[in-house]
Image (cartoon, rainbow, N blue to C red):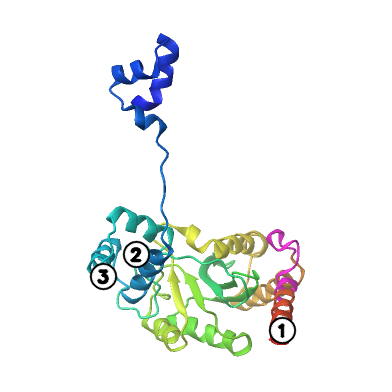
């Protein structure tokens, strides 16, 4: 390939014909004019997705073997390309023996509230040096702050209790994105997610960008709530956090939401969904 790239320069410098320069460099003339043709077979692509769905732990190599058994004349590199384009690659590390974990790397962009939430923990200290933690839960579509809970420490049972309170008034999410903390990898949270049919989407190690919505919100909490204040007690933290959360949801203009507040954006999205549903019924 480097010879092909240099060939025009050789012709210009030495005033050689294409045939002569190719002979000197040992390059086939057909390679200069070759245009790659990428064939796409939607039936094959659909079959690869079907196999990956039913054979959860199979990578592209085993899928290639199954396709050949079915009579497909496929090259392993072609299967690998489609496999990656469809976002079917397996994650290298997932929590062991967890039933509600998403094992493939497919990432979806939420298009409505409650499709995807994010969870994370933040740390701070009181005025007397006592360490505290904050549990953050955000709706990735509307950017609403769903939970901003403060305590000296959190157990997995407390995380589950906060989620139970949230779904009572808001409904269940389809998936929850979180990091690999022990509270999120716990059996209690996995059982709650399994019985409620909620998928747990764990960030890949060393990839905070996998939970980008929550990381962005954490930065806002740090700048506007934690850094400007010294908290005298846990009760003081909870009071100020609840006040800041209400202000954020109802008054904070969000640039990615066309400068609407999270509450306004969520309300508008809900109204549009209802209107679309009514229109669909009317058309039928």
| On screen, residue 146 above or below 224 | below
Q: Residue at x 69, y 83 (%)?
A: 280
Q: CA distance from mark 1 to mark 2?
A: 42 Å
Q: Secondary structure at mark 2?
A: loop
**Which contiguous range is marked in magenta?**
253-266
Residue under label 2, please give it. Answer: 90
Q: Secondary structure at mark 3?
A: loop
Q: Nearer the viewer, residue 76 or 240?
A: 76
Residue under label 1, please give it. Answer: 283
In contact (CB < 8 Å): disc 1 and disc 2: no
Q: Quadrant of residue 239?
A: bottom right
Q: Residue at x 56, y 76 (%)?
A: 115
Q: Quadrant of residue 253?
A: bottom right
Q: Is residue 187 magenta?
A: no
Q: CA distance from mark 2 to mark 3?
A: 23 Å
Label tally: 3
The image position of residue 284, as x and y in percent, is 68, 86
Q: Nearer the viewer, residue 34 or 76?
A: 34
Is the residue marked by circle 1 packed among few (<14), some (14-19), or many (20+) residues within 10 Å? few
Q: CA distance from mark 1 to mark 3?
A: 42 Å
| On screen, residue 3 above or below 208 | above
| 241 left or right, relative to 33 | right
| On screen, residue 241 above or below 75 | below
Q: Residue at x 69, y 87 (%)?
A: 281
Q: Nearer the viewer, residue 75 or 55?
A: 75
The image position of residue 150, as x and y in percent, is 57, 75
Looking at the image, tell me whether mark 1 or mark 3 is earlier in sequence order. 3
Numbered label attached to residue 70: 3
């Amino acid at each position: 390939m480097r010879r092909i790239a240099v060939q025009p320069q050789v012709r210009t410098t030495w005033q050689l014909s294409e045939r002569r320069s190719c002979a000197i460099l040992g390059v086939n003339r057909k390679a200069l004019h070759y245009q790659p043709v990428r064939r796409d077979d939607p039936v094959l692509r659909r079959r690869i997705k079907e196999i990956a769905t039913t054979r959860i732990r199979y990578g592209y190599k085993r899928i290639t073997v199954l396709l050949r058994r079915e009579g497909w004349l496929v090259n392993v590199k072609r299967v690998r390309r489609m496999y990656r384009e469809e976002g079917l690659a397996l994650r290298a590390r997932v929590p062991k023996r967890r039933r509600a974990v998403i094992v493939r790397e497919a990432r979806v962009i939420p298009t409505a509230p409650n499709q995807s939430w994010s969870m994370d923990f933040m740390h701070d200290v009181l005025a007397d040096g006592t360490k505290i933690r904050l549990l953050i839960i955000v709706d990735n579509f509307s950017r609403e702050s769903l939970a901003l809970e403060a305590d000296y420490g959190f157990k997995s049972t407390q995380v589950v209790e906060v989620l139970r309170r949230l779904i009572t008034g808001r409904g269940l999410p389809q998936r929850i994105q979180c990091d690999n903390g022990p509270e999120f990898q716990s059996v209690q949270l996995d059982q709650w997610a399994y019985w409620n049919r909620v998928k747990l989407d764990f960030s890949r190690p060393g990839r905070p960008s996998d939970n980008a919505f929550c990381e962005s919100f954490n930065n806002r909490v740090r700048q506007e709530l934690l850094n400007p204040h010294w908290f005298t007690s846990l009760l003081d933290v909870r009071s100020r956090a609840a006040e800041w959360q209400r202000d954020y949801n109802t008054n904070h203009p969000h640039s990615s939401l066309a400068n609407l507040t999270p509450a306004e954006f969520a309300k508008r999205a809900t109204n549009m969904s209802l209107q679309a549903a009514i229109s669909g019924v009317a058309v039928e």
